[in-house]
Amino acid sequence: MGGPVSNRNQVKLQIRIAATCICVRKSSSQCREQTLLKSEVQDPSESTIAEESKNTLVFGDSDHATFRSGWEVLMGQNEVVNWIRSTPQNTATMRYPGEWKYAGGGIEEGESPRMAAIRELEEEFDVKIPKDAVLRLLSIRQTMPIRNVSNIMFNYIAVASENPWLEKYAVDAANKRLEQRRFRHKALVASGDFWNMTAAEREQVAPEVREIRWLNMKQAAVYAYTSLHKCCCYVNEFQKSEFRRLGRRYRDAMYITLTILMDVNSFPSSRSIHRYSRGLHAPAELRRVRFLWEGMSQHAFDLAVSTPSQCVVGSTQPEIRKYFKGAEQVTAGDLRRRFQARLEQDRMEERAENLSPAQHGASPDVVTTEYTGAVTHSKL
């Protein structure tokens, strides 16, 4: 009886710091509002906790969700095969294989979260980011542990209207370069030269992103939402064919991506994004959202998940119980109210500026202070 529990106590959680960059622009379509019926994406399998959470977030008590913000988000579809970790004998898959996601990844030594977000965006979406790029901190999230690793994610947002490099970004040209990269990589694998490369050399030639697209909020939300289905609902034929070829049965859950999308949809304008980010205090936000710490035993975490209402020994248990009891669960109704309140605030500010342009002529695009504080493994 003591063996398995003892082993679980020896498995310690690791905390990693990561950063993403969400690139958005306003749709050029005359009809920016989109409606998603719950029946369009209903999971045919039995209801699960994940199903309830995503329904609460996207639909609430309604049978439909309305996307009013008019944002489009720049996303890349991951390759399925992880060529860096694969060998001639064994094919490894990417984390979030074939999923549509933002550019992002772990921070490297000496980087701030913002620097990491920019580097990942440049690497994954093949774009050069200027020094004066306007990236605003949108949120900080901590993920559920996967393979004993939990990520603390610093999520930045770049709006095209205040970033000329993003307005000019040529998606078709970027996809052409991705296609050429796949062609060169395929030739290296066929010749056997790829397997003789160092890991660093492989990173320079291996494909990571399959395709880049501007997706409207409804499309992006559907892709993330269906990843949480108990049955496998593929995003497109590429993911479907690769999963079947490799014998993979399930998609990776994109719940954090979904929560960020719904959060972005609650901002009616770049003005409202700037106003919110300006008031966001990163150290305080990190303390608010954090519920796991470095070195916590896997067994203690398992107990907190399976018995969230019971007291489990350990200083972090109240935070975990709070997390699983849904105290931090944002509902679709909350997001609708936030959207309306932000829209009203926009209108008030615009009226004030029109009444007194001399007094209200300061640019709303002042860059907020960058968070450079260290993320320690102690309880903040």
Image (cartoon, grey):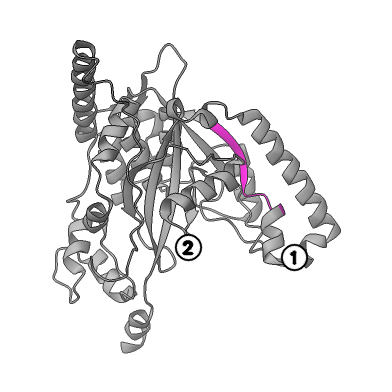
In the current view of this chain or complex, which residue is farthest to the bottom?
Answer: 2
What range of the chain is rendered magenta? Answer: 205-213
- Which residue in the structure is indicated by mark 2? 110
Image location (x, y in percent) of residue 226: 43, 40
Q: Is residue 311 left or right of residue 73?
A: left
Q: Position of residue 122 (x, y in %)?
A: 57, 44
Residue found at x 27% / y 74%: 300
Q: Quadrant of the N terminus?
A: bottom left
**Which residue matches tag 1?**
88
| Residue 137 location, quadrant | top left
Residue at 70% in and 59% down: 202
Is residue 130 shown left or right of residue 362? right
Image quadrant of residue 54?
top left
Image-based side of 238 in relation to 341, left or right: right
The relative height of residue 353 versus residue 367 in the rendered view (above or below) is above
Q: Which of the 4 image quadrants contains residue 270? A: top left
In the displayed structure, does residue 71 sit left or right of residue 66? right
